[in-house]
Image: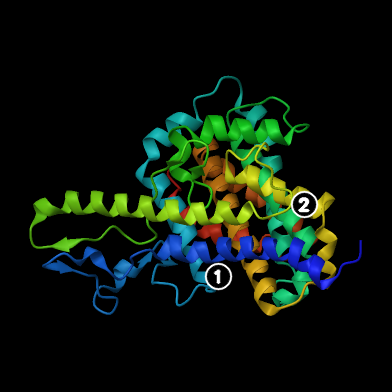
Amino acid sequence: MPHTARRFAEEAIPVGQFMKVLSEGFYWAYEYRRDQYLGVENSIAPDSEVESDSQSVWGLNLEEATNKSDTGRLKEHVLYATVAQAVDNRGQLLQFFRGRSGSDRIYEKKTFRNLTNAWRDEYCLSSPVDAEPEDRMKTAEWRITMCYYALYKAASAIVHTKDSSDLSNSHVRTLNMHANQFLSSRARCLYGYPLNFDPSSGDFFDFRLPCPQHIGIDKEEWQEELLNDRKESYAEHNERLMSALYNKAQNISTWDADRETSSFFHVFKLLREWANYGHGGIFSRLYGPGYIKFIDRAIQLLTYSAISTAEVATICAFGFDRFERELRYYREACEEGISDGSLHIDERFEIYQRALSNF
């Protein structure tokens, strides 16, 4: 069937709209109510000029992103949210991830194999690093596929921190195990937007906003009530974000009510199947800077979120020193081959070194 403009509207635009909602959702998820401070009388908002320390943690810039396309700032906020959750829940995460039988070597081998493969996927997705989105989106359907594999390998790495069985022949089995044993466990505090929702149950997980919890009020006894109000308000907001995202996904041609969609990882698997086996070739006539940038931005932010979650989970499972050693091996391989192949993980590692070195 010819790739006509009408065919593009039927097959590709729903994917573009899904990516737009996903991309812009990162802004709304990580900047929600940043400047409102609940509107409580006598409340004091942090002043970025006076209280500059409150805008930077572990070297991450937590000032509000200037707009919905500020990918760099949003990545910092994603990382802060994930790392801060790990720091706050250190005891329960270490107990959960290190509660396994057998030698660590059995689990480490498969975990780090998946994680380093995900690092390579992330590099490929952003390459050429200094290019414009138009250059990367010449192969949009393969970028979608590669993004799914980065998500899958991140989930698989997390699963293998506690399961040493061979899951490589079944993506569905791996993703189901990830949803059932991790997204529904004490480890769920690590997952942020859009990974922290189970549409089948309607459950939302605890999630730290990407700025220090700061409520400066005259009456200290109000603080707990205000914090609880903020959490409840965020949960309602996150529900709206995820509902919009899943509604857009339903417009993609491969969406089927009978297919497994119990986590966002499952949803993206359906999108990958569309790109690989459905009508991904329609992107040969991809046009319009909007869709091109939405897809490029969504893929980068989503990959960053999933892989950083897997990295922190791996540190919780095996310790910071073991993680650092594996990264050193990966860096050495990159230095002998693709010199900037460890660019993304190197930047995140600096934050892990400051925040998680005692794990």
Residue 116, can we see it?
no
Q: Going 40% across and 51% down the picture, which residue do you hit?
A: 84
Q: Residue furthest front?
A: 6
Instruction: Name the amino acid type tagged 2.
Output: Trp
Circles 2, 1 touching at the beta carbon (< 8 Å)? no
**Which image quarter: residue 3?**
bottom right
Residue bearing mark 1: 71
Q: Is residue 249 left or right of residue 278?
A: left
The image shows residue 241 at horizontal and vertical percentages of 47, 56
Residue 127, can we see it?
yes
The image shows residue 49 at horizontal and vertical percentages of 28, 80
The image shows residue 30 at horizontal and vertical percentages of 43, 62
**Which image quarter: residue 289?**
bottom right
Q: Earlier in the sequence, mark 2 or mark 1?
A: 1
Where disc 1 sits, the SS reads helix
Residue bearing mark 2: 274
Q: How many marks?
A: 2
The image shows residue 256 at horizontal and vertical percentages of 69, 43
Where disc 2 sits, the SS reads helix
Task: Give how far apart the Cα atoms at labels 2 and 1 are.
Answer: 26 Å
